[in-house]
Structure formats: C-alpha cells, structure tokens
Amino acid sequence: MLRVFVMLAAFFGLTGVGLGAFAAHGLKSKLSADYLAIFQTGAHYQMLHALALLAVAVLSLHLPGRLVNAAGWLFCIGILLFSGSLYALTLTGIGKLGIITPFGGLSFLAGWLCLGLAAWRYQG
C-alpha cells in the first residue's frame, strides 16, 4: 500500500495547496468572509490529512495489517466528504451540502482510531 498511499498523499497535498491558494487569491473578492473561512477550513483539513496519509504509507511498512490500511482509506474518504462538501457548499451556496461534512469528520476520527488501535496491537 506504500505506493498507493504516497500517490494519494501527493495528490491531496498538491490539490490542497492549489485550492488554498485559489481561495486566498481567486475567491477572496467573490466569497463572504464566512464562506472564505469555510473553504479555508476544508483546505486546512485536506492538508493535515494528506500528511497523515503520508505517515500511513510509511507505517504500512512497519505495522502491516488491516487497521493501518483502513486508516489510510478512511483519511481519503474523510478528505473527499469533509473537505469536498465544504468546497462545494461555499462555491454553490447550497447549504444542505453541509449535511455531508460530519460524515467526513467521522471518517477522520475513525482513521485516527484505527491508527491508535494498530499501535496498541503492535508487538515490536
């Protein structure tokens, strides 16, 4: 899973930086301060979890098993649901998209729980 998770981390890192810059420069005059902050929150969480995904890639070499892999996939799902819903909400103005955001947050939490459990079970 090393290659897959590093590639996904690179993709999410690349797009996170790009979207953050887009918000700071391209959306600053187009979005309200509240919506701009929401968009930036999405970019912030995307970047944090891109780095976490990079750590998962390295950990997959040392803590092989389903829990570490599950953490990686849960971080990916979290980025798509949490950050993606915040981007969509701010760009479309459709407030109901915010209903999706907590599911992304739960995916992030579940991913961190999986990492913690993998460490707890580690016998090395």
Image (cartoon, helix red, strand yellow):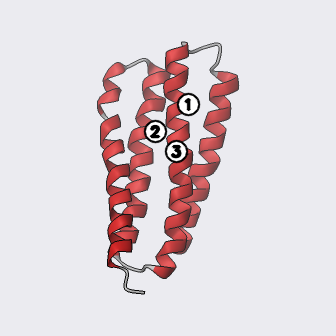
The mark that comes first in sequence, 2 or 1, is 1
Q: Secondary structure at mark 3?
A: helix
Q: Position of residue 2 (x, y in %)?
A: 53, 73
> Which is nearer the N-term, disc 3 or disc 1?
1
Q: Residue at x 52, y 69 (%)?
A: 57
User: In the structure shown, which secondary structural element does the residue marked by tag 2 occupy?
Assistant: helix
Kind of residue at badge 3 = Gln
Give left or right: position of 69 versus 59.
left
Q: Which mark is residue 83?
A: 2
Classify the position of the C terminus by image quarter.
Answer: bottom left
Real-space Cα distance between discs 2 and 1? 9 Å
Q: Quadrant of residue 71?
A: bottom left
Q: Position of residue 119 (x, y in %)?
A: 38, 73
Which amino acid is tagged 1?
Gln
Indicate which disc residue 40 carries: 1
Disc 3 crowd rating (10 Å Cα; few below 14, some 14-19, many 20+) is many
Q: Are marks 2 and 3 in contact (CB under 8 Å)?
A: yes
Other residues around mark 1 within 10 Å, as few (<14) / some (14–19) / many (≥20): many
Give the residue pinned by disc 3.
46
Q: Residue 74: percent from the left, percent from the top?
A: 37, 56
Q: CA distance from mark 3 to mark 1?
A: 10 Å
Q: Sort mark 2 into few (<14), some (14-19) or many (20+) by Cα contacts within 10 Å.
A: many
